[in-house]
Image (cartoon, rainbow, N blue to C red):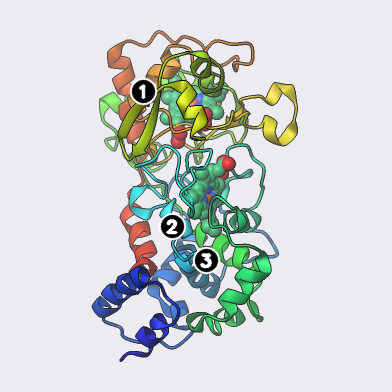
Amino acid sequence: MKPRLVRANLGKIAFSFIFFAMFSARSEDGPREPGTERELPQDRMALARLQSPPLGLPVVPVPENNPVTIEKIGLGRKLFFDRRLSLNGTMSCGMCHIPEQGFTNNELSIPIGVNGQSLNRNAPTILNAAYALQLFLDGREVSLERQAVLPLLAHNEMANPSAEWLVAKLAGLPDYQGLFEVAFGGGPSMERIGKAIASWERTLLAADSPFDRWRYGGEVHALTPKQKRGFDLFLGKGRCDECHSVGAKYALLTDQTFHDTGIGYLRDVIESQKNSPVLVEIAPHVFVSVPREVVGQVGQSRPTDLGRFEVTREPKDKWRFKTPTLRNVAVTAPYMHDGSLRTLEAVVRFYNRGGVSHPGLDPLIGPLGFNDSEIASIVAFLRSLTANNLAVLEADARTVVMRH
Ligand code: HEC
Ligand code: HEC
């Protein structure tokens, strides 16, 4: 029996053993010596991508105390997809940030964590998270290094009882022997786990979209006339770029700050005051209508989500959420912090109505007066923001998904 299978037998629950054995049997490369992850060509490609980002993206900011190396990239990817990093071995980061679903979860408006509990918010994509100055939809974290540690310990996400517990578990896993040492010159620690994951995440740069080729690459025919018209409306009547920024040399499609579009007020105040039944998502796209009082009783009702206010406690920050990038937005449905809008058309129609009028509404949001054809043009433009290298990034991720 292959050494990897022997290891897999030890202490693994039946399901994950079968899963593991299935993929082990398929992999051509047989048993690996510890440390060989760092030899993957994907790691070299990832580093090259970081050093020279795809068209439309600026230089990637990298913290001085965590320079990106090939070894950290390989280790970070492995950690990201490793279900053993959760309390009961069922959940990895990659199960909410799914490579084939735009590194988010297209199925659920609100993902479900290790113990079946729903989280409070829609999972954002981690594509181009390298540029985010503030992380989470309320900006409560500012570095990918520190962000990565939080889901590992959050009771409703990966639920590890403590940092020490997780570090000891990793130190005991045979396939991690030597990996931290090679990447960091010492054994695993929470800080190093964060640094490795952040290093791999920084390489998930997705651009060179039709829009980028048109705007930054001089390819006049990269956009259709409809998409160009949509972009004109995006800049003009829609004033979308006031928040979803487009620069002269690159575009992040976010101003990296927080705004109240009315969607939070709609959910927390207007919807919750209605006596109407609540639609509860019991499985992807399967909704049942439940009376509001019952929802409260079974504990499925979500607490109000005041966004940035939860961090600053400043009344002006109520219902302000981070402006998401619109890059790759066609593949990252559902939309908004609560995942309440399922299509791009629904989002554009939401803006067209002027969001939801209430005292905190951002002054830039108001009725836009788009007709149906203009709405369709904006949606077409949003679809031109899909990177041409998504398959490369999915393949990069799968190099390790297939091995677990
Ligand atoms: C159970 C699902 C789930 C798991 C598991 C999970 N995440 Fe997330 N992730 C989310 C949700 C939901 C948010 C948004 C939370 C918020 O804003 O409060 C998020 C936010 C993020 C962000 C911030 C993105 C941004 O633009 O602000 C990053 C980066 C991230 N996760 C990486 C990770 C890493 C690394 C792991 C594993 C250590 C992980 N996630 C595990 C659901 C998950
Ligand atoms: C005042 C700033 C502002 C303006 C103007 C604005 N947006 Fe947004 N946009 C946001 C914020 C903030 C969110 C996130 C809201 C949330 O999470 O609840 C968002 C979310 C979105 C989303 C969903 C993205 C996702 O991943 O969930 C799309 C699509 C979008 N905006 C497109 C547009 C378009 C098109 C326009 C112009 C018609 C526009 N926005 C104008 C701030 C703005």
Q: Report, in whole angstroms, how far the alpha carbon at label 3 lies from the one at label 2.
A: 11 Å
Q: Indicate the secondary structure of the residue bearing disc 3.
A: helix
Q: Report, in whole angstroms, how far the alpha carbon at label 2 lies from the one at label 1.
A: 27 Å
Residue 177 % position (x, y): 54, 84
Visible residue check, residue 61: no
Q: Say left or right for 220 vs 369.
A: left
Which comes before the other along the chain, label 2 or label 1? 2
| Residue count near mark 1 (Cα–Cα under 10 Å), binned few <14, some 14–19, many ≥20 | some
Mark 2, ligand 1, within 8 Å: the answer is: yes
Q: Which residue is mark 3?
A: 85
Q: Report, in whole angstroms, how far the alpha carbon at label 1 lies from the one at label 3.
A: 37 Å
Between disc 1 and disc 3, the foreground one is 3
Mark 3, ligand 1, within 8 Å: the answer is: yes
Q: Say left or right for 282 vs 37.
A: left
| Residue count near mark 3 (Cα–Cα under 10 Å), binned few <14, some 14–19, many ≥20 | many
Which residue appears at 59% of the width and 62% of the height? 160
Q: Indicate the secondary structure of the residue bearing disc 2.
A: helix
Q: Which residue is mark 1?
A: 346
- Whether residues under marks 1 and 3 lie with C-beta atoms below 8 angstroms apart, the answer is no
Residue 306 % position (x, y): 63, 28
Q: Which residue is mark 2?
A: 94
Mark 1, ligand 2, within 8 Å: the answer is: no
